[in-house]
Image (cartoon, rainbow, N blue to C red):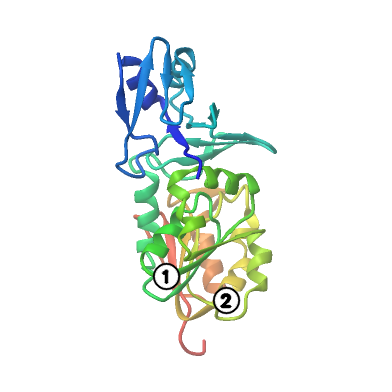
Amino acid sequence: MEETYFLTFREARRLLLSSGGVRLNLDLRKTNRTFEITREGDRFIFPDGTEVEKNVLERIARDEDTVYFVRSGGVYKAAIARNGFYKLVPTIPPTIEINGIRMHRTKGTNPLQDTRSKVNSVRPGEGETVLDTCMGLGYTAIEASKRGAYVMTIEKDPNVIELARINPWSRELFTGGKVQVIQGDALEVVRRFKDESFDVIIHDPPRFSLAGQLYSSEFYRELFRVLRPGGRLFHYVGNPGKRYRGKDLQRGVMERLRGAGFVGVRRTEKALGVVAKKPTGPL
């Protein structure tokens, strides 16, 4: 398999300060593996023989908001300009930014801690089946699968899936065997599932202004239908008290979840969301 080496401003700055060879982690700290890069004047030679000029590294060193990668003799941005602008941002692990909006919390936390707080809200376990409605870079699906669950995750945007395939922290989505990736609109995909298919649902949608249908009573009724009796739901909403068009978004979510049949609906402050259950008996 062709090796890919990832660079951020951190690695670029270390290389520029080196006078000869230097060992660096080149998979965005996914592992502890390091590689030897040698310097010959203004050229930096990677293990596969790719030569990167000093002026290229200087540009990367100035760019603190983008991930780059070296592959097949070239240096590329981990970015896609197609129906918008998508890129990996060099937090550890990376987040994805779409048209300037980051898809993970990064202030005072990191995407992995953010993911774990969401998954801990519903604690999927060995042998359970999890629905992850909005894949993104797949950290939620991967974390749930590491706890022994089988996960089905949905992603509407092919550009997001393409960046996930590039991102080393998303690798288990496509290689681990316990995650099934489905490309499609979440509402339409969920409608095709049989009743009571899942033990746990993790619903982490884009902001309301971008995907209002994923906050609708119609969608919540579908989530209720496909959840098994006693099953758990986590719904990311964002900062408590956040308002949309003058209305308290979190309160509205909780009211619509109750209207769809969920019980035990309550806020979970650490994960900035709401948890709920499907009752085990008749309503």
User: Are discs 2 and 1 less than 8 Å apart at CB?
Assistant: no
The alpha-carbon separation of the residues under discs 2 and 1 comes to: 17 Å
Q: Quadrant of residue 118?
A: bottom left
Q: Residue furthest front?
A: 49
Look at the picture and state if 256 lies above or below 117.
Answer: below
Image x and y of residue 129, in percent: 47, 73
Q: Quadrant of residue 219?
A: bottom right
Q: Amino acid at mark 2?
A: Val
Query: Mark 1 sits on what residue?
Result: 149
**Alpha-carbon neighbours of circle 1 within 10 Å: few (<14), some, or many (≥20)?**
many
- The residue at the point 46 percent across, 82 percent down is 279
Image x and y of residue 74, in percent: 55, 26
Q: Amino acid at mark 1?
A: Ala
Residue in front for this viewpoint, 245 or 264: 264
Residue 270 is labelled as none
Mark 2 secondary-structure assignment: helix
- The residue at the point 34 percent across, 35 percent down is 25
Look at the picture and state if 90 lies above or below 254.
Answer: above
Q: Decide if residue 267 is in sight here.
A: no
Q: Residue furthest bottom?
A: 282
Q: Residue furthest top?
A: 41
Query: Mark 2 sits on what residue?
Result: 226
Residue in front for this viewpoint, 82 or 240: 82
First reached walking from the N terminus: tag 2 or tag 1? 1
Look at the picture and state if 145 lies above or below 209.
Answer: below
Residue in front for this viewpoint, 215 or 172: 172
- Mark nearer the viewer, 2 or 1: 1
**Alpha-carbon neighbours of circle 2 within 10 Å: few (<14), some, or many (≥20)?**
many
Q: Decide if residue 184 is in sight here.
A: yes
Look at the picture and state if 230 lies above or below 174.
Answer: below
